[in-house]
Amino acid sequence: MSSTAITALHRGRAVDPGQVLSGPLCGVGLSWLEPGESILLEADEVEHTVFVTAGGGLATTEDTSEDTTGDAVEADEEVVEVPLAEGTALTLPLGGEVTIVAGDAGMEYFHAVLAVPRGGTR
């Protein structure tokens, strides 16, 4: 018997794929942000990927640079803004942080969360 699962993703409903998959994918969901609404994504022990399915918005983060030893160094805390439109994907690797703000029409997005093994680095 197959362990295949078919799940209808409705806005705001997160799914735990760990019930079927054995890989690092630990959460998926389809969400909606009202115009001007924001979320903060932090990649402390997990990584994130977001795919905009409708509407649009803006992703903001502080620019960081790496010195010659590979250590992150603040680059005068310059804020980087990236427009998000339908069909845009955003990935947030371990250690990153981003704020997503919905535009005037709101924003629907598919969000996947991936577990990172303890001590895992890129």
Image (tube, rainbow, N blue to C red):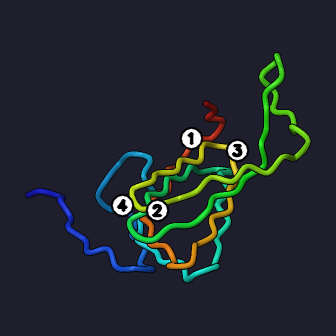
Given the image, on which type of amino acid does mark 2 rest?
Answer: His
The residue under label 2 is: 111
Q: Secondary structure under badge 1?
A: loop
In the picture as drawn, the residue positioned furthest to the front comes out as: 104
Given the image, on which type of amino acid does mark 3 rest?
Answer: Gly
Instruction: Check whether the beta carbons of the residues at disc 1 and disc 3 lie within 8 A of each other.
Output: no
In the picture as drawn, the residue positioned furthest to the left comes out as: 1
Q: Quadrant of residue 30?
A: bottom left
The residue under label 3 is: 95
Q: Secondary structure under badge 3?
A: loop
Given the image, on which type of amino acid does mark 1 rest?
Answer: Pro
In the picture as drawn, the residue positioned furthest to the top comes out as: 68
**Residue displayed at 82% across by 18% down:** 69
List x then y, in percent, for residue 114: 49, 50
The residue under label 4 is: 17
* Circle nearer the viewer, 2 or 1: 2
Instruction: Check whether the beta carbons of the residues at disc 3 and disc 4 lie within 8 A of each other.
Output: no
Q: Nearer the viewer, residue 12 or 115?
A: 12
Q: What's the CA distance linking mark 1 and mark 3?
A: 13 Å
The mark nearer the N terminus, 1 or 3, is: 3
Q: Is residue 53 above or below residue 61?
A: below
Q: Quadrant of residue 102?
A: bottom right
Given the image, on which type of amino acid does mark 4 rest?
Answer: Pro
Instruction: Check whether the beta carbons of the residues at disc 2 and disc 4 lie within 8 A of each other.
Output: no
